Image (spheres, rainbow, N blue to C red):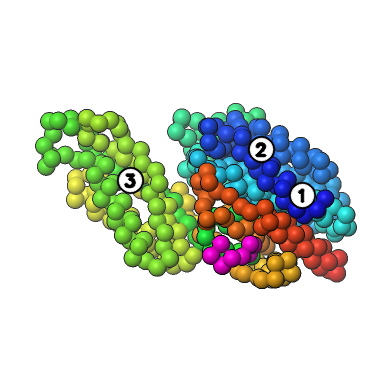
Amino acid sequence: MHFAELAERCISRCRIIAGFSETSGITRTFLSDPMHACHRAFSGWMEELGMQVRVDAIGNLRGLYGGGRNRRRLLMGSHLDTVPGAGAYDGVLGVCIALAVIDAVRTMDLPFDIEVLAFSEEEGVRFRTPFLGSLAAIGRFDPALLNLQDSNGRTIRDAIMHFGLDPARLGEAQIDGRAFAYLEFHIEQGPVLEDARERIAAVEAIAGQSRLELTFKGRASHAGTTPMHLRRDALSAAAEWITHVERSARDTDGLVATVGRLQVVPGTGNVVPGEVRAGLDVRHSCDEIRIPAVSEICSAAEQIASRRGLTVAIDETLNQSAVTMDEHLLKLMERAILRTTGVARRITSGAGHDAMIMAEKVPSAMMFIRSIGGISHHPDESVYLEDVEEAIRAGALFLSDLAEQGKRTA
Ligand code: GLV
Ligand code: MN
Ligand code: MN
């Protein structure tokens, strides 16, 4: 099959997967019911390539190409979950391109097997903590996480069992010493490539991120009878703090900080809010800037709460260091991109990716595909067919170079 046809098929597959959603738009959270249909579709496409398919205990769909004939194993992957109201390409495109690249190198004699990992969870939506799929794959899934609850009071353990999986078998999700590299394709999700009029790029580093949950506690009271000076309004405190978060990030070069989730209790118009839970996300490519910034933002929350007669509880759910991609694989990828497009660009990722988790265990590389308008985490997220074609072409070259090196060192 031609690269153009493979690219067309990738895009139409992303559109098919977009139809498996919890809502009328695109929302597919960790082990939600539509994930079954998503797995069925991908399993079929993997089997067409002759892959052996299984679902591990955290719900990662895994396809093995090469039948385990070789001792070494190249991993390729991305995630199948989405944010609420997502586009069709974040995560899913990477899995589709991985399959297209395998299709493109089918006639090659590879000195390694390929395992595709379609991760069950990367976004951190349902249980407010991300990377559940890749953490299990590298053996860093903390069993205490099994007790985390979603907004309906269901735990991760319940979700795993409800999906038909066995939490006691989480250890079997781990990759082993056969894995020698991890490769991820992903939509850029930002405007840099579009601005540079380039189609694809090699990722050199991924920004670190912190996620925290803050609970401001004041006192709920009657909105009509409680004079302003006698209130302990949790939402007003949270609002003051949120503007502080924005100011802090604006004042620190390269820092981004977001309060994207607020839960107001009791959450009705005629009651002074007694409690607010807020989700905070802070990122920077340099951990030495991010970590002190998080401390400063937390101290500000404590000061604002205490000045207003409230308390604030702070729970850090993620402190993920910035990660650089493997230099040798990065050079190999740049070379493949240069030969495909005539230009080789390195780019830093502000978004988090499964590659930043996998890189802890196995040398990792990523390729970005230009986003149209830089739009992502939005229904309008899109890619150009020609860019996907270039990504598959460069991906196939990357694999063929890797195979050549493998043969030389075998
Ligand atoms: C994933 O998309 C993230 O960076 O939040
Ligand atoms: Mn995302
Ligand atoms: Mn993603």
Q: CA distance from mark 3 to mark 1?
A: 53 Å
Give the residue pinned by disc 1.
Answer: 5
Marks 1/2: CA–CA distance: 16 Å
Q: Is residue 269 left or right of residue 109?
A: left
Q: Is residue 392 left or right of residue 279?
A: right
Percent from the top left, x then y, of residue 316?
42, 50
Q: Nearer the viewer, residue 271 or 85?
A: 85
Q: Is residue 176 visible?
A: no
Residue 198 falls in which quadrant of the image? bottom right
- Please give left or right for residue 159 compared with residue 98 in the image: left
Q: Nearer the viewer, residue 392 or 95?
A: 392
Q: Amino acid at mark 1?
A: Glu
Q: Nearer the viewer, mark 3 or mark 1?
A: 1
Residue pictured at 61% horizontal, 35% vertical: 19
For the residue marked with disc 3, what is the amino acid? Answer: Ala
Residue plotted at (64% across, 62% down)? 200
- Residue beneath label 2, please? 16
Q: Reply yes or no: does residue 181 show up in magenta.
A: no
x then y, percent, for residue 1: 82, 50
Which quadrant, please, contains the C terminus? bottom right
Could you tell me the amino acid type at mark 2? Ile
Which label's residue is closer to the chain start, 3 or 1?
1
Residue position for label 3? 313
Q: In the image, which residues are magenta?
A: 194-201
Pointer 1 local density, CA inside 10 Å: few below 14, some 14–19, many at least 20:
few
Picture coordinates of residue 243 (x, y %)?
29, 53
